[in-house]
Image (spheres, rainbow, N blue to C red):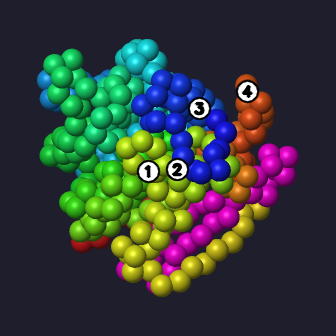
Amino acid sequence: MQKSNTRSRPIRKSAAFRIAIGFCTAVCTALCIPLSITASKAHAEPLWVPHDGLDRLVWVHDARVTDAPAPLILAIHGYRTPEDAAALRDTPERLTWSRLEPLTERDGAITLYPAAYQGQWALFDGLANTTAPDGTAINDESFLLRLIARFVDNGKADPNRIYITGISDGAIMTYRMICLRDTPFAAAAPLIGSAYGDHLGDCAPEKPPALMHVHGTDDAVLPYEGWIFATGREVSVPEVMEHWRRLHGCTGQDGQMLENIDPADGSTVGEMTWTGCTRDGAVKRYKVIGGGHDVPAIDAIQPTDDGRLINRDLDTLGVMWAFFRTNPRPE
């Protein structure tokens, strides 16, 4: 997908655009979150959650080793076609992030992989594939909150260590959830996707989660500088980071370039940590200079099947999990 000089984009609901995002996010899930060399101790198990007259699928990776309340991660997938979404019922490996699981197993955490209805999260009103068969609008916001409450109420999840991450459209959904006034999340890591404009405009959580954002400057699907579509806009990364800086009262910045481990991948990573915040280290951004719609991974196989090169300077999931572990919800 080529960028426009006017920063306008095809209508979000157009078939061609959705197919393009479906392809990119499907590739991203399969390739940008590579399989781990370490075998997972626990297997993801399916959980069906009734909500708004529908049975919603969630794959649950429960790595707890004690009965004590554990950290919980909500991992939100990117766009799927309805056909691809149907296959998730029988193939959890197409939805789960196997490289994340050895990290969470080390700390006995729970990871939830909810599946969007027909593959598309209800990011905003009127989006295609987000209406139930009876004509009612899908409410993913209440579905995800109910899912978290289920694990907190049964004593499995620690309410002060609830985290969320999402890829592409899943990152947009992540911002929707962390912008809720009473958001339950201690920290969030949106990957290669930003906030929807209306969500950011109303974004004033009582306890702002810590934020770690990862994005490529050459992302042609969800551009780093944002884009405008028929019903709104995706906010630029600088704008969303400035909003989070204000939420946390940060007064300074501390930046560095990560080691360029693989110059052949054509991209580098700049790390920025905001300082003087109400929570130390609570606002971070990893800017993948020259990176596209891919999540960096130090063990990415180069090139991908379609010839793309993925940045190998940043261990995204390892850094994300360390960020989560050091950012519980403040009392």
Q: Amino acid under label 2?
A: Trp
Q: Residue 7: where, in percent of width, then height?
A: 58, 50
Q: What is the magenta range? A: 260-287
Q: CA distance from mark 4 to mark 3?
A: 11 Å
Between disc 2 and disc 4, the foreground one is: 2
Q: Are the two marked residues, 2 and 4, in contact with CB atoms closer than 8 angstroms? A: no
Q: Amino acid under label 1?
A: Arg
Task: Sort mark 2 into few (<14), some (14-19) or many (20+) by Cα contacts within 10 Å.
Answer: many
Instruction: Identify residue for label 1.
Output: 233
Q: Residue 123: where, in percent of width, then height?
A: 35, 41
Residue 24 disc label: 3
The image shows residue 273, relative to residue 14, as above or below, that is below
Magenta segment includes 304: no
Q: Quadrant of residue 161?
A: bottom left
What residue lies at 22% left-to-right and 23% top-to-bottom? 132
**Which secondary structure, mark 2?**
strand
Q: Left or right of 226: which side holds 175? A: left
**Which secondary structure, mark 1?**
strand
Quarter of the image with the C terminus in it: bottom left
What residue lies at 57% left-to-right and 57% top-to-bottom? 225
Instruction: Identify residue for label 4.
Output: 306
Q: CA distance from mark 2 to mark 4?
A: 25 Å
